[in-house]
Amino acid sequence: MNKAIHTEKAPAALGPYSQAIVAGDFLYVSGQIGIDPVTGEMTEGIENQTKQVLKNIQAILEKAGTDLTKAAKFSIYLKSMDDFSTVNEIYGSYLQEPYPARSTIEVSKLPKDALVEMDVILHLKA
């Protein structure tokens, strides 16, 4: 049976999906963008959005009783690959070795005109 995870410390879902789902030994965190959950507004600039995305993910993981050390796979979606090095540097500061597997993809548009979106899969028993 799947268990939905929801916290007020991360933005509410923008559609019919959960912030995260526990399925067996895995936690699937839905794509997060740089919305500040307090104001409900998108943060400005790639640095602020990247940090907010990771803070939102951390809040969801905290609610699920876990943290980024259990991350197995990240997907990062960028509006512009020109932001890759900035996002990569900030992303790396939130993680420790062994780093999770990762994909980084440039896309034409993201929800709310975000500059970056990330989702993550965690192995809870790792």
Image: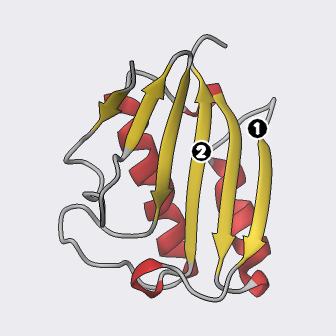
Q: Earlier in the sequence, mark 2 or mark 1?
A: 1
With 88 as the anchor, is 30 left or right in this view? left
Residue sitting nearer the eye, 30 or 49 = 30
- Compute the Cα span from label 2 to label 1: 9 Å
Residue positioned 71% across, 41% down in the render:
73
Hey, what amino acid is under mark 2? Answer: Val
Hey, what amino acid is under mark 1? Answer: Pro
Q: Label 1's element?
A: loop
Q: Is residue 35 above or below residue 119?
A: below
Could you say where residue 118 lies in the image, as x and y percent from the top left? Answer: 58, 59
Q: Is residue 116 above or below residue 112?
A: above
- Which quarter of the figure has residue 37? bottom left
Q: Is residue 43 above or below residue 21?
A: below
* Residues at discs 2 and 1 in contact (Cβ within 8 Å): yes
User: Residue tagged by mark 2?
Assistant: 120
- Farthest residue toward the front? 1
With 61 as the anchor, is 98 left or right in this view? right
Could you say where residue 69 lies in the image, as x and y percent from the top left? Answer: 63, 27
Could you say where residue 58 lies in the image, as x and y percent from the top left? Answer: 44, 42
- Which quarter of the figure has residue 5? top left
User: Residue tagged by mark 1?
Assistant: 100
Residue sitting nearer the eye, 113 or 51 = 113
Could you say where residue 28 lies in the image, as x and y percent from the top left? Answer: 52, 38
Image quadrant where one finds the C terminus: top right
Category of crowding for the residue at label 2, using alpha-carbon neighbours closer than 10 angstroms: few (below 14), some (14–19), many (at least 20): many
Residue positioned 48% across, 81% down in the render:
114
Image quadrant where one finds the N terminus: top left
Between disc 2 and disc 1, the foreground one is 2
With 8 as the anchor, is 56 left or right in this view? right
